[in-house]
Image (cartoon, rainbow, N blue to C red):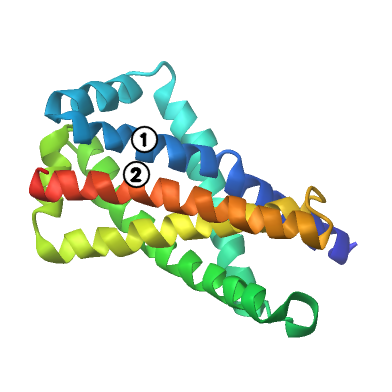
Amino acid sequence: MTENREFFYRRLHSLLGVIPIGIFLVQHLVVNHFAVYGEESFNNAAGFMHDLPFRLMLEIFIIFIPILFHAILGVYIAFVAKNNVQRYGFFRNWMFYLQRLTGIITLVFIVWHVWETRVAIGMGNAELDYSLMENILSQPFFFWFYIVGVVSTTFHFANGLWSFLVSWGITVSPRSQKIATYGTLIVFLAITYIGIRSLIKFAYGV
């Protein structure tokens, strides 16, 4: 019974990492990328998301609760899991190790990002507009902190997507898993570019 429960939790952990958390990540990066087209463009995109009907309920049940569950179980997995060289080989074990490492980094980054944006806005200490991120990223330390955080988050999602495809029986054969490796690499590069391009725009205006 305990093994069945753990199996279920790990499956749910994997699923939540893609749906809804992964979808939210991509959507969040795309909204931020509107900054590349100018301050007004970003403010309009961010304002549209902020004014969605039932936004608070969506944030709680579609974003915060899934992230909290995924984070808590993810920390547990990170500290109890062991590499399996015989089953996965050198490369995939490195990906497994980096998945655990980036999970911890991503957790720290998300907590800080939510604190200085969503919480600050909720407390009335900041406004949801272009200048919020511009002021944060104009500081060199936080610019590089966000660079590391975004790369860690996008890697964790893309590599987790590969694991999701395997654990849910979508990619079973070695060939399909190899194709998935290239596919998730493309996903990683694409969303990382979108994220970093936005950070550069906020920080340097270019």
x, y (%) of residue 69? 58, 52
Residue in view at x 80 percent, y 77 percent: 87
Callout 1 secondary element: helix
- Residue 45, given in percent of the width and then of the height, sits at 28, 24
| Image side of residue 158 versus residue 48, left or right | right
The image shows a total of numbered marks equal to 2
Amino acid type at image mark 1: Val
The image quadrant of residue 90 is bottom right
Image quadrant in which the C terminus is located: top left
Q: Is residue 58 left or right of residue 198?
A: right
Instruction: Write down the residue under mark 2.
Output: 194
Circle 2: element type: helix
Question: How far apart, in angstroms, are the residues tagged by discs 1 and 2?
Answer: 7 Å
Q: Amino acid at mark 2?
A: Ile
Q: Disc 1, disc 2: CB below 8 Å?
A: yes
* Residue 93 placement: quadrant: bottom right
